[in-house]
Image (cartoon, coloured by chain):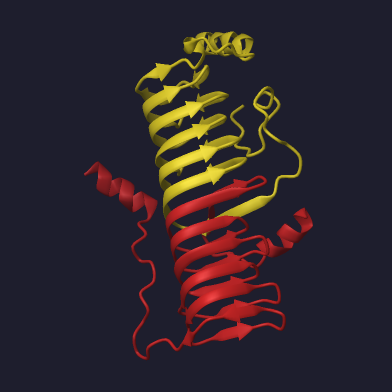
Amino acid sequence: MSNHLDAEKSTLPSSPDGRRLLAVIGSSATLTGKFEISDSIEIECMIAGELKVGGKLVIGQNGVVNADVQTKDAVIKGRYSGNLIVRGDCEITATGHVDGNIETDSLVVAKGGFFNGNVIKSPAGQETEVPGAVYLLNERRQTARK
Amino acid sequence: MLARTLVPSDSHAPSTGVKLGNPVTLLTVVGQAARIEGKFDIADSLQIECEIGGELAVGGQLVVGEKGIVRANVRTVDAIIHGVYEGNMVASGNIEITSTGRVIGNIETDSFVINKGGFFNGNVTRQTAEGKPKDSADRLEEEYAVVANA
């Protein structure tokens, strides 16, 4: 199992100064709320709410996501339901199960992957608004000191 | 004790019912910044190096890293705070504020350590005060002894 996860971890792009900002380990976890993430996230648990991702969203095979998502890239190996806006590439793998609407210019559904919903082409000439609202922690701290 | 490890060390494990064994990574966030608000229900442990608000229920160890800023009400077994924490915390195990830790809020626990340099502003309440006998009483005396000697 751990080998499997190690292999999956490599799907996250290693951004030059990408730090591990949050790690949840254990047998189960349920998170509900609003997520604003400047880079990437990999999910192997249950998440609901709203996600804004500036990099890559990976829903692992054990991941269950029920949320409205705005992201750059998305790879779905688990279950997803909701409205998904992808500015870059969206991929549903053979184990992926998607129920909802996807707005993207680039969608790949692998053989075996499940998709039920609408695909909408991203509006031309209109950059979908993605994160930006995430403060850099240091900036935030400096602002707070003033 | 200060080692930033997610797997509870032996000194944390007893009497808490934390399941050791193969730790499975359930969620990973990488990058420069992240802000998360909401309700978290986590069976085992988590390490935070970003901003989190809301409500956390943790069945193992909560680690707030040096870059972590947590404004939340927390119910946990163990907690190690290297960063900033504001809120009310109930811990059935141990709470440690390290030399870089900064805590504002109320804490309910039987075992509480503040390292030299650590900041704490708030109230501490004992869990056993309401007549709930705990097997951690012996350990508690040890922990206070550690604080006194520091």
* Position of residue A40 measured from the top left corner of the image (x, y, whole percent): 52, 63
In terms of depth relative to the viewer, which is nearer, A48 or A60?
Answer: A48
| Residue A61, placed above or below residue B91 | below
In terms of depth relative to the viewer, which is nearer, B28 or A121?
Answer: A121
Q: Quadrant of residue A57?
A: bottom right
* A131 left or right of B64 in image: left
Residue B31 visible at all:
no
Chain B image colour: yellow
Residue B130 visible at all:
yes
| Residue B71, placed above or below residue A118 | above
In terms of depth relative to the viewer, which is nearer, A52 or A143?
Answer: A52
* Position of residue B125 measured from the top left corner of the image (x, y, whole percent): 42, 17
* Position of residue A33 measured from the top left corner of the image (x, y, whole percent): 43, 54
* B137 left or right of B82 in image: right
In which quadrant of the rendered image does the N terminus of chain B lie? top right
Q: Residue at x 47, y 27 (%)?
A: B90
| Residue A28, placed above or below residue B122 | below
Quick one: which residue is furthest to the bottom in this view? A124
Q: Quadrant of residue A61?
A: bottom right
| Residue B132, placed above or below residue A61 | above
In terms of depth relative to the viewer, which is nearer, B3 or B105?
Answer: B105
Q: Residue at x 63, y 53 (%)?
A: B26
Chain letter, red in picture: A
Q: Residue at x 60, y 40 (%)?
A: B45
* Position of residue B105 measured from the top left corner of the image (x, y, whole percent): 36, 28
